[in-house]
Image: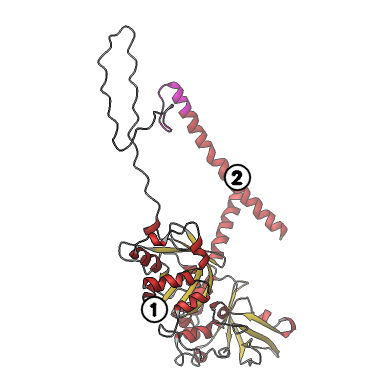
Amino acid sequence: MGALHIFLFTLMSITISIHAHNITEILSKFPEYSEFNSYLTQTKLADEINSRTTITVLALTNGAMADVVGKHPLSVIKNVLSLHILLDYFDSTKLHKISDGTTLTTTLYQTTGNANGNLGSVNITDLKGGKVGFGSAVSHSPLASTYTKSVKQIEYNISVLEVSSPIIAPGILTAPAPSASDFNITAALEKAGCKTFAALLVQSGVLKTYQTAIETGLTVFAPNDEAFKGKKVPDLNKLKSAEVVSLLQYHAVPSYTPIGTLKTKKDPISTLATNGASKYDLSASTAGDQVTLDTGVDSSRIASTVIDSTPFCIFTVDSVLLPEELFGKAPSPAPGPAPETSPAPAPEGASPGPAPEASSPSPMMSPPAPPTSSPAGAPADGPAADSENSTAKKNVGNVNAPALLKVLLTVSVSVIVSVYLS
């Protein structure tokens, strides 16, 4: 029973760690952060926060949010709020024990592909007298925001702290909102090493579909040039024009789906190629910070973020995504005719009867050679067979218990060793 208890406790611990926190639920208990909480959901930053296991959220009150909301588009608001999500754990104690009194820490804004140099980092400085200042890590930026109070902590997992005012990086408020008219998809793809993919979009006319979708939301998974040299990639010249279009549409999702949202996706993801009975969907799985897309035929890793700017984002992937609808496995061949059996020999002295009529072989398939032994799983007649079946049943019944005990002992030993070494 001891080993079983340890095993169940381990499973429970793993489940708890997977669902460690939900920023929306945490902030919902504090009405003074309702505006901040709402925009975390609208920008999908909440998904990114929930997908990470070590993070600090610098929350702004409704009054502090007024300096940003209503004056700027959603894309700019997202960039500002991204600077308030630190990719490290800070609580009140750690803030007042910063080595040398100041430190630079990376924020979520650094992961968007829009931040150069220290633009995506924040300067945290212990100002003494109980005050801690926050500001952009760009040189000569003021520490215009200060730590106000602690809101919620799940130790070494997530910390929510209130700060007095928004942290503003140079140029972040003046960045133009992206749109289909001023964003060059092909130029961005070519710069990211996806020239082949970009050329196919232009040649097929699918680029226009992408540009139209940007206004309401678009996510692109662009294979890099090396991906098209893979052994599994079919000869695109042998595909029909409609199939090429479907293949390229399959590499885009008609909604804004940043990396954090992909990490939390459980249901199949529809693509631009999805149409009625033609599913053309993807599934996403996560291991740590790595996201992998599965097509049903093959899988591909999301390698990098080209751009993440509401309402669209572009990622590079290591392999061409092959939809099951176009490149699914061929169906298994139909089973062949049953093998012929030789008639039993006539008893000695009996007159031979008329010869049986020979069955004509199928014109489509030659019959296979008769088996030299009984087919697997077919019971034999007689006491020997009964004895063998009885022995087999006993063996089947004796396999599961030792196997389960071995698993339990392995887990318990691993847990005990880990505890001892720690």
Mark 2 is on which residue type?
A: Lys
Query: x, y (%) of residue 4?
Result: 58, 50
Q: Neighbour class for label 2 at 10 Å: few (<14), some, many (≥20)?
A: few
- Look at the image and tell me in which quarter the C terminus lies: bottom right
Q: Main secondary structure of the magenta part?
A: loop
Q: Which residues are magenta?
A: 373-388
Earlier along the polypeptide chain: callout 2 or callout 1? Answer: 1
Q: Which residue is mark 1?
A: 211
Residue lying farthest top?
A: 349
In which image quadrant can residue 119 be found? bottom right
> Which residue is depicted at the point 60% across and 54% down?
6
Mark 2, mark 1: which one is toward the viewer? 1
Residue 327 seen in the figure: yes
Q: Would you place residue 380 above or below residue 48 in this image?
A: above
Considering the numbered disc 2 on the image, is that residue within a helix, a strand or a loop? Answer: helix
Q: Which residue is mark 2?
A: 406
Mark 1 is on which residue type?
A: Gln
> Which residue is depicted at the point 34% across and 65% down?
241
Q: Is residue 6 magenta?
A: no
In which image quadrant can residue 334 be found? top left
Residue 31 seen in the figure: no
Query: x, y (%) of residue 383?
Result: 44, 21
